[in-house]
Amino acid sequence: MGIAPTYADFSVTPARLANADVTSDGAVFAGSHLAVTAGGGVTVGFEVADPADVEQVTLTVTALVSKSGRSPGYAPMDVLVQGEPVVEGLTVPGGGDLPQDNVFAVPGHLLKPGANTLEIRSSARARTMLWLYRVTLDPVWERGRSERARTAAAARDTVFAYRTESRPAHGPSAAWRPAPRLAFHVDRGEQSLPAQLGWRDTDGAETAVSFQSNMSDFHGCRRHADGTVHEYRGRLTGRWPSLEDADEVPASALRRFRTEEGWGGRWHASGELRLLVDAGGSALERATWRDQRGNSGVAVLHALEEEAVGEPVRGFTGYYQRHNEGPIGYRGTEIGLGRV
Protein backbone atom coordinates (compact mmCIF):
# COMPACT_ATOMS: atom_id res chain seq x y z
CA MET A 1 0.00 0.00 0.00
CA GLY A 2 1.42 3.38 -1.01
CA ILE A 3 -0.30 5.50 1.64
CA ALA A 4 -2.49 4.53 4.57
CA PRO A 5 -5.73 6.38 5.42
CA THR A 6 -4.54 9.85 6.37
CA TYR A 7 -6.45 12.61 8.13
CA ALA A 8 -6.19 15.40 10.69
CA ASP A 9 -9.49 16.33 12.35
CA PHE A 10 -9.23 19.72 14.08
CA SER A 11 -12.81 19.74 15.39
CA VAL A 12 -11.64 18.30 18.72
CA THR A 13 -8.65 18.81 20.96
CA PRO A 14 -6.29 17.09 20.83
CA ALA A 15 -6.79 16.70 17.09
CA ARG A 16 -7.95 13.28 15.93
CA LEU A 17 -5.17 11.93 13.66
CA ALA A 18 -4.41 8.97 11.42
CA ASN A 19 -1.01 8.55 9.70
CA ALA A 20 -0.34 12.17 10.65
CA ASP A 21 1.41 14.42 13.12
CA VAL A 22 0.67 18.13 13.37
CA THR A 23 2.62 21.23 14.31
CA SER A 24 1.32 24.78 14.09
CA ASP A 25 2.36 28.41 14.37
CA GLY A 26 -0.18 31.16 14.96
CA ALA A 27 -3.06 28.69 15.26
CA VAL A 28 -5.28 27.98 18.28
CA PHE A 29 -8.15 25.60 18.91
CA ALA A 30 -11.42 27.56 18.83
CA GLY A 31 -14.11 25.08 19.83
CA SER A 32 -14.73 23.29 16.51
CA HIS A 33 -11.69 24.26 14.40
CA LEU A 34 -8.20 25.73 14.39
CA ALA A 35 -8.20 29.51 13.99
CA VAL A 36 -5.10 30.55 12.02
CA THR A 37 -3.93 34.15 12.27
CA ALA A 38 -2.29 36.21 9.51
CA GLY A 39 1.04 34.61 8.61
CA GLY A 40 0.28 31.50 10.65
CA GLY A 41 0.07 27.96 9.45
CA VAL A 42 -0.28 24.27 10.12
CA THR A 43 2.11 21.52 9.05
CA VAL A 44 0.89 17.92 8.71
CA GLY A 45 3.52 15.21 8.52
CA PHE A 46 2.49 11.92 6.93
CA GLU A 47 4.17 8.69 5.83
CA VAL A 48 4.26 7.18 2.35
CA ALA A 49 5.36 3.55 2.02
CA ASP A 50 5.94 3.46 -1.74
CA PRO A 51 5.33 6.57 -3.89
CA ALA A 52 5.45 4.40 -7.04
CA ASP A 53 2.04 3.04 -6.00
CA VAL A 54 0.53 6.54 -5.83
CA GLU A 55 -0.02 8.15 -9.21
CA GLN A 56 -1.87 11.12 -7.73
CA VAL A 57 -3.23 12.17 -4.32
CA THR A 58 -6.63 13.75 -3.70
CA LEU A 59 -6.18 16.35 -0.96
CA THR A 60 -9.23 17.83 0.74
CA VAL A 61 -8.88 20.84 3.05
CA THR A 62 -12.11 21.76 4.84
CA ALA A 63 -11.95 25.43 5.86
CA LEU A 64 -13.64 28.81 5.90
CA VAL A 65 -12.54 32.43 6.15
CA SER A 66 -14.13 34.22 9.09
CA LYS A 67 -16.30 37.20 8.24
CA SER A 68 -15.50 40.88 8.57
CA GLY A 69 -18.72 42.02 10.18
CA ARG A 70 -21.45 41.09 7.69
CA SER A 71 -19.02 41.00 4.77
CA PRO A 72 -16.78 38.19 3.55
CA GLY A 73 -13.41 38.12 5.27
CA TYR A 74 -9.96 38.06 3.72
CA ALA A 75 -7.44 35.30 4.46
CA PRO A 76 -5.89 33.84 1.28
CA MET A 77 -4.59 30.30 1.74
CA ASP A 78 -1.44 28.64 0.39
CA VAL A 79 -1.13 24.83 0.27
CA LEU A 80 2.27 23.19 -0.19
CA VAL A 81 3.45 19.57 -0.34
CA GLN A 82 7.17 18.98 0.25
CA GLY A 83 7.55 22.77 0.02
CA GLU A 84 6.11 22.81 -3.52
CA PRO A 85 2.97 24.94 -4.00
CA VAL A 86 -0.22 23.09 -4.84
CA VAL A 87 -2.24 26.31 -4.72
CA GLU A 88 -1.32 29.89 -3.78
CA GLY A 89 -3.52 32.76 -2.62
CA LEU A 90 -6.73 30.73 -2.69
CA THR A 91 -9.85 32.48 -1.43
CA VAL A 92 -11.95 29.84 0.29
CA PRO A 93 -15.48 30.17 -1.16
CA GLY A 94 -18.71 30.35 0.79
CA GLY A 95 -18.48 33.82 2.32
CA GLY A 96 -17.63 32.53 5.78
CA ASP A 97 -21.03 31.04 6.64
CA LEU A 98 -20.19 27.33 6.35
CA PRO A 99 -16.99 25.26 6.06
CA GLN A 100 -16.14 24.37 2.47
CA ASP A 101 -14.38 21.27 1.10
CA ASN A 102 -11.49 22.51 -1.07
CA VAL A 103 -10.24 19.61 -3.21
CA PHE A 104 -6.82 19.52 -4.91
CA ALA A 105 -4.91 17.04 -7.07
CA VAL A 106 -1.36 16.47 -5.80
CA PRO A 107 1.01 14.91 -8.36
CA GLY A 108 2.49 11.65 -7.19
CA HIS A 109 6.03 12.79 -8.11
CA LEU A 110 5.96 15.22 -5.16
CA LEU A 111 5.86 12.31 -2.71
CA LYS A 112 8.89 10.47 -1.35
CA PRO A 113 9.35 7.27 0.66
CA GLY A 114 8.96 7.83 4.39
CA ALA A 115 8.19 11.23 5.91
CA ASN A 116 6.31 13.81 3.82
CA THR A 117 4.95 17.25 4.71
CA LEU A 118 1.79 19.19 3.91
CA GLU A 119 1.68 22.88 4.82
CA ILE A 120 -1.40 25.12 4.99
CA ARG A 121 -0.60 28.80 5.44
CA SER A 122 -2.67 31.93 5.88
CA SER A 123 -1.38 35.01 4.07
CA ALA A 124 0.55 37.58 6.08
CA ARG A 125 -1.85 40.11 4.55
CA ALA A 126 -4.93 38.34 5.97
CA ARG A 127 -7.39 40.65 7.71
CA THR A 128 -9.54 37.90 9.26
CA MET A 129 -8.97 34.33 10.42
CA LEU A 130 -8.54 31.15 8.39
CA TRP A 131 -10.52 28.41 10.14
CA LEU A 132 -9.30 24.85 9.51
CA TYR A 133 -11.66 21.96 10.24
CA ARG A 134 -9.99 18.89 8.74
CA VAL A 135 -7.58 17.56 6.13
CA THR A 136 -7.70 14.22 4.30
CA LEU A 137 -5.35 12.63 1.75
CA ASP A 138 -6.28 9.70 -0.49
CA PRO A 139 -4.78 7.92 -3.50
CA VAL A 140 -6.75 9.10 -6.51
CA TRP A 141 -8.42 5.72 -7.09
CA GLU A 142 -9.52 5.36 -3.45
CA ARG A 143 -11.84 8.33 -3.13
CA GLY A 144 -13.18 9.10 0.32
CA ARG A 145 -11.24 6.35 2.09
CA SER A 146 -9.71 8.62 4.72
CA GLU A 147 -13.00 10.45 5.37
CA ARG A 148 -14.75 7.12 5.94
CA ALA A 149 -11.99 6.12 8.36
CA ARG A 150 -12.30 9.49 10.14
CA THR A 151 -16.06 9.27 10.62
CA ALA A 152 -15.83 5.64 11.77
CA ALA A 153 -13.21 6.62 14.37
CA ALA A 154 -15.32 9.56 15.57
CA ALA A 155 -18.41 7.36 15.83
CA ARG A 156 -16.69 5.00 18.27
CA ASP A 157 -17.65 7.57 20.92
CA THR A 158 -21.37 6.90 21.41
CA VAL A 159 -21.94 8.36 24.90
CA PHE A 160 -22.33 12.15 25.14
CA ALA A 161 -22.90 14.73 27.88
CA TYR A 162 -23.83 18.40 27.42
CA ARG A 163 -24.09 21.48 29.62
CA THR A 164 -27.45 22.98 28.67
CA GLU A 165 -29.36 26.28 28.79
CA SER A 166 -32.92 27.31 27.98
CA ARG A 167 -35.03 30.44 27.63
CA PRO A 168 -38.74 31.11 27.03
CA ALA A 169 -39.88 31.04 23.40
CA HIS A 170 -41.75 33.89 21.66
CA GLY A 171 -41.60 36.22 24.64
CA PRO A 172 -39.53 39.34 25.26
CA SER A 173 -35.82 38.75 24.78
CA ALA A 174 -34.67 36.80 27.81
CA ALA A 175 -31.30 35.63 29.09
CA TRP A 176 -30.30 32.00 28.71
CA ARG A 177 -30.52 30.19 32.03
CA PRO A 178 -28.80 26.95 33.08
CA ALA A 179 -30.85 23.78 32.57
CA PRO A 180 -30.22 20.17 33.67
CA ARG A 181 -27.37 18.34 32.00
CA LEU A 182 -28.25 16.19 28.98
CA ALA A 183 -26.63 12.76 28.64
CA PHE A 184 -27.51 10.33 25.89
CA HIS A 185 -26.45 7.09 24.20
CA VAL A 186 -28.30 5.87 21.09
CA ASP A 187 -26.45 3.00 19.46
CA ARG A 188 -27.42 0.40 16.82
CA GLY A 189 -23.79 -0.53 16.21
CA GLU A 190 -23.67 1.24 12.83
CA GLN A 191 -20.73 3.59 13.57
CA SER A 192 -22.45 6.82 12.60
CA LEU A 193 -22.77 9.95 14.72
CA PRO A 194 -26.24 11.37 15.44
CA ALA A 195 -27.45 14.43 13.54
CA GLN A 196 -30.80 14.89 15.30
CA LEU A 197 -32.41 13.51 18.45
CA GLY A 198 -35.92 13.83 19.85
CA TRP A 199 -37.62 12.31 22.86
CA ARG A 200 -40.80 12.31 24.93
CA ASP A 201 -40.90 11.65 28.67
CA THR A 202 -43.65 9.76 30.47
CA ASP A 203 -44.94 13.05 31.95
CA GLY A 204 -45.62 14.37 28.43
CA ALA A 205 -42.60 16.68 28.07
CA GLU A 206 -41.06 16.64 24.57
CA THR A 207 -37.67 17.73 23.23
CA ALA A 208 -36.07 17.93 19.77
CA VAL A 209 -32.44 18.93 19.08
CA SER A 210 -30.01 19.07 16.16
CA PHE A 211 -26.24 18.73 16.51
CA GLN A 212 -23.21 20.36 14.94
CA SER A 213 -21.48 17.80 12.70
CA ASN A 214 -18.60 17.50 15.18
CA MET A 215 -21.06 17.14 18.11
CA SER A 216 -19.65 20.22 19.88
CA ASP A 217 -23.05 21.95 20.25
CA PHE A 218 -26.75 21.46 19.76
CA HIS A 219 -29.78 23.69 19.39
CA GLY A 220 -33.43 22.77 19.76
CA CYS A 221 -36.62 23.29 21.71
CA ARG A 222 -38.48 21.78 24.66
CA ARG A 223 -42.17 21.61 25.47
CA HIS A 224 -42.56 21.00 29.19
CA ALA A 225 -45.28 18.92 30.81
CA ASP A 226 -47.22 22.11 31.66
CA GLY A 227 -47.26 23.17 27.99
CA THR A 228 -44.66 25.94 28.17
CA VAL A 229 -42.10 25.99 25.37
CA HIS A 230 -38.43 26.95 25.63
CA GLU A 231 -35.50 27.30 23.29
CA TYR A 232 -32.86 24.80 24.27
CA ARG A 233 -29.14 24.60 23.56
CA GLY A 234 -26.10 22.74 24.82
CA ARG A 235 -22.32 22.59 24.78
CA LEU A 236 -20.41 19.30 24.83
CA THR A 237 -18.71 18.50 28.14
CA GLY A 238 -17.73 14.88 27.55
CA ARG A 239 -17.86 11.97 25.10
CA TRP A 240 -16.87 8.37 25.67
CA PRO A 241 -16.78 5.06 23.77
CA SER A 242 -18.87 3.27 26.41
CA LEU A 243 -20.85 3.84 29.60
CA GLU A 244 -18.11 2.06 31.55
CA ASP A 245 -15.83 4.99 30.68
CA ALA A 246 -18.41 7.69 31.50
CA ASP A 247 -18.56 7.99 35.29
CA GLU A 248 -20.87 11.02 35.18
CA VAL A 249 -23.54 9.33 33.03
CA PRO A 250 -26.14 7.25 34.94
CA ALA A 251 -25.82 3.71 33.58
CA SER A 252 -29.03 2.81 35.45
CA ALA A 253 -31.00 4.78 32.82
CA LEU A 254 -29.76 2.54 29.97
CA ARG A 255 -32.36 0.48 28.11
CA ARG A 256 -31.09 -2.45 25.99
CA PHE A 257 -33.27 -4.20 23.44
CA ARG A 258 -33.04 -7.35 21.36
CA THR A 259 -34.53 -6.21 18.05
CA GLU A 260 -36.20 -7.34 14.83
CA GLU A 261 -36.74 -5.61 11.50
CA GLY A 262 -39.88 -6.18 9.47
CA TRP A 263 -39.67 -6.48 5.69
CA GLY A 264 -40.69 -8.93 2.98
CA GLY A 265 -43.74 -9.99 4.97
CA ARG A 266 -41.83 -11.34 7.99
CA TRP A 267 -39.62 -10.31 10.90
CA HIS A 268 -35.83 -10.71 10.80
CA ALA A 269 -33.40 -10.67 13.74
CA SER A 270 -31.37 -7.46 13.97
CA GLY A 271 -28.67 -6.04 16.22
CA GLU A 272 -29.02 -4.73 19.75
CA LEU A 273 -30.41 -1.23 20.31
CA ARG A 274 -29.07 0.70 23.31
CA LEU A 275 -31.06 3.75 24.46
CA LEU A 276 -30.26 6.24 27.19
CA VAL A 277 -31.63 9.78 27.33
CA ASP A 278 -31.26 11.61 30.66
CA ALA A 279 -32.17 15.31 30.76
CA GLY A 280 -33.29 15.56 34.36
CA GLY A 281 -36.93 14.71 33.62
CA SER A 282 -39.11 11.63 34.00
CA ALA A 283 -38.55 8.27 32.32
CA LEU A 284 -38.16 7.92 28.56
CA GLU A 285 -41.33 7.08 26.60
CA ARG A 286 -40.32 7.69 22.96
CA ALA A 287 -37.07 8.35 21.10
CA THR A 288 -36.53 9.52 17.51
CA TRP A 289 -33.18 9.98 15.81
CA ARG A 290 -31.42 10.58 12.50
CA ASP A 291 -27.70 9.91 12.03
CA GLN A 292 -25.15 11.72 9.86
CA ARG A 293 -25.51 9.09 7.13
CA GLY A 294 -29.21 9.94 6.81
CA ASN A 295 -30.54 6.81 8.57
CA SER A 296 -33.47 7.44 10.93
CA GLY A 297 -35.54 5.58 13.48
CA VAL A 298 -38.35 5.79 16.01
CA ALA A 299 -38.85 3.69 19.14
CA VAL A 300 -42.05 3.98 21.22
CA LEU A 301 -41.50 2.18 24.54
CA HIS A 302 -44.32 0.18 26.14
CA ALA A 303 -45.12 -2.89 28.23
CA LEU A 304 -45.60 -6.13 26.29
CA GLU A 305 -47.03 -8.60 28.82
CA GLU A 306 -46.89 -9.63 32.46
CA GLU A 307 -44.56 -12.36 33.63
CA ALA A 308 -45.62 -14.86 36.27
CA VAL A 309 -43.66 -12.94 38.90
CA GLY A 310 -45.52 -9.78 37.98
CA GLU A 311 -42.63 -7.99 36.31
CA PRO A 312 -43.63 -6.30 33.03
CA VAL A 313 -41.82 -7.38 29.89
CA ARG A 314 -40.97 -4.10 28.20
CA GLY A 315 -40.26 -3.41 24.57
CA PHE A 316 -40.69 -0.90 21.79
CA THR A 317 -42.45 -0.55 18.46
CA GLY A 318 -41.36 1.79 15.70
CA TYR A 319 -39.72 1.96 12.31
CA TYR A 320 -36.28 2.27 10.81
CA GLN A 321 -35.28 3.85 7.50
CA ARG A 322 -31.85 3.62 5.91
CA HIS A 323 -30.66 6.43 3.66
CA ASN A 324 -32.25 6.23 0.19
CA GLU A 325 -34.37 3.21 1.20
CA GLY A 326 -37.99 2.83 2.25
CA PRO A 327 -39.09 2.50 5.90
CA ILE A 328 -39.25 -0.93 7.52
CA GLY A 329 -40.81 -2.23 10.71
CA TYR A 330 -38.71 -2.12 13.86
CA ARG A 331 -39.49 -3.68 17.23
CA GLY A 332 -37.63 -4.91 20.26
CA THR A 333 -37.82 -6.68 23.60
CA GLU A 334 -35.84 -5.34 26.52
CA ILE A 335 -32.85 -7.36 27.65
CA GLY A 336 -32.97 -7.87 31.42
CA LEU A 337 -34.39 -9.94 34.25
CA GLY A 338 -32.47 -12.90 32.93
CA ARG A 339 -33.52 -12.36 29.31
CA VAL A 340 -30.60 -12.19 26.86
Image (cartoon, rainbow, N blue to C red):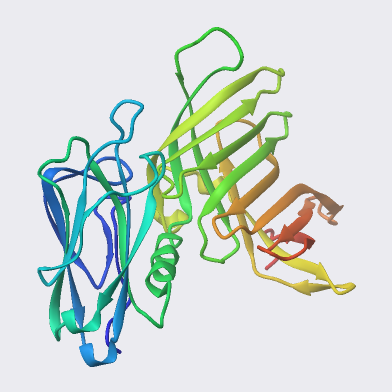
* Farthest residue, direction top: 172
* Farthest residue, direction bottom: 52
Q: Say if residue 50 shows up in the picture.
A: no
- Look at 60% across and 17% down and name the residue there: 169
User: How far across and down, in percent of the image, does residue 146 sit?
Assistant: 37, 71
Say left or right for 258 vs 215: right
User: How far across and down, in percent of the image, does residue 161 sit?
Assistant: 44, 42
User: How far across and down, in percent of the image, does residue 16 sit?
Assistant: 29, 60
Residue nearer the viewer, 163 or 336 = 163
- Look at 28% across and 53% down and name the residue there: 10
| Rendered-image quadrant of the N terminus | bottom left
Say left or right for 87 vs 146: left
Question: Which quadrant of the view contains residue 147?
Answer: bottom left
Number of marks present in the image shown: 0
| Rendered-image quadrant of the C terminus | bottom right
User: How far across and down, in percent of the image, does residue 234 sit?
Assistant: 45, 33
State whether residue 163 is above or below residue 226: below
Say left or right for 221 vs 249: right
- Look at 40% across and 65% down and name the residue there: 153
Q: Say if residue 124 shows up in the picture.
A: yes
Residue nearer the viewer, 307 or 204 = 204
Say left or right for 60 vs 193: left
- Look at 37% across and 40% down and name the residue there: 95
State whether residue 105 is above or below residue 158: below
